[in-house]
Amino acid sequence: MIRLFLRDLSLSIRAGGGFGLALAFFLIIVTLVPFSIGPEPLLLAQIAPGVLWLGALLACLLSLDRLFALDFEDGTLDLLVTAPLPLEGVVAAKSLAHWVTTGLPLTLAAPVFGVLLGLEGDAAIWLVTSLALGTPALSFIGGFGAALTVGLKRGGLLLSLLVLPLYVPTLIFGAEAAARGMAGLNAATPLALLSGITLASLALLPFASAAALRANLK
Amino acid sequence: MKDIGLARLTVKDLGVGRGGLPLLRGVSFALAPGQALMLRGANGIGKTTLLRTIAGLQPPQAGRVEAEEDTLAFAGHSDGVKATMTVEENLEFWAAVFGHEGTARAMRDLDLMRLMTRPARDLSAGQRRRLGLARLLVTGRAIWLLDEPTVSLDRESAGLFEAALAAHLGQGGAALISSHLDIGGMTDVLDLTPFRATPAALGLAEGSW
């Protein structure tokens, strides 16, 4: 399982793996916002947490359709299913690798990109906290969507349609926690709910994803 | 080398199908250690589906497959090779997944030593297939389920595969192979044509649906 995790990490960093793609996409979204909204520092700082959260979510979505599709195409998935690894563990390892290559870099880069939107000081800490707690759920929920659509040609769009509504609670509580923290209010409640969603996703979704994969391989 | 486990596979009255459509009915055979069985039949008769069902990738429509746990190794049409990883990394990964060793020996047996550090995307179709077959050696599984293993292999490479297969059988392993090409030393043949699922065999009258 650890080997699978490490393999997925090294595959994504190598040529054509897509590492950095999500980060660049995130940067572009964040840069585009001042152009579309206008250069008003106060307004930008106010909407910054929401924009950064939305950007992180879309950037995460970008690489999801590759999560199982590549292994499906080259036959690796068949072999993994017949290997002595629990399929739930395979899904968890791959989702975790996805988070380490997309969610984690986005979280770490968010304060830097936040500067473009006039975000500074304490606000950045709240943003990083909320992203760190929320982005693992994005990868695990996305893994479920990817497992559902794995056999489909051009399944990427369907994947987005399936997964985006499932991201709503994470987005609400994540952006709320960051916004409240920035305003100096108590952010404990949204953070607790955000962590709850993430933990539930980690605990339950690998089983659902494994069942979806088994059904799709038939 | 770890013990490969008991290579005994019994298939009883197995019915398989693809996409809900029944293909084969009443397939029964037994495979003993040291035995290799060749599956024959026209295109589309269900050789691949039968192998995938036995491998556990899809549930049987009827009957059952009896084999000891963790004794089956499946190799399908695609080799499960990662293009950006080298030959050695690909094998090392599968060896680690199956908790087995023998990467070097597998590469030697299938003449991959010279290609060891080459990324798999730069391999020819035949070399890639040899890598896929070398993967079987590092699984340490007793029963090989092979779907057209010698496709795209030249005569020399097919000879390497035959030697590896003979060594595997000699160790008490077994193999179930679907192929339309002749593989040296294979004598036991199961023709699947009589097992083809027909409406009559399924107990359906003509036009009942």
Image: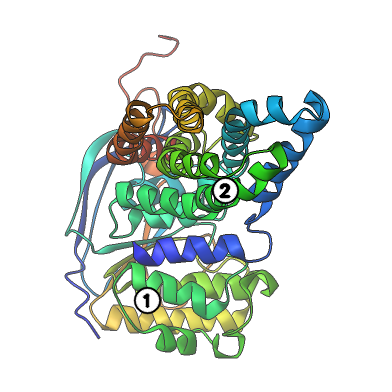
Which residue is label 2 attached to? A106
Residue A69, placed above or below residue B135: above
For the question of whether residue A209 can be seen, the reply is yes
* Residue A139 x %, y %: 46, 42
* Residue A61 x %, y %: 58, 37
**Residue B172 falls left or right of residue A213:** left
Bin the neighbour count of mark 2 within 10 Å (Cα to Cα): few under 14, some 14-19, many 20 and up.
many
* Residue A33 x %, y %: 75, 31
Q: Amino acid at mark 2?
A: Leu
Residues A76 and B19: in front is A76
Q: Split into 4 quadrants, where in the image is the N terminus of chain A? A: bottom left
Question: Element at badge 1?
Answer: helix
Residue A105, placed above or below residue B37: above
Q: Split into 4 quadrants, where in the image is the C terminus of chain A? A: top left
Which residue is label 1 attached to? B138
Residues A189 and B180: in front is A189
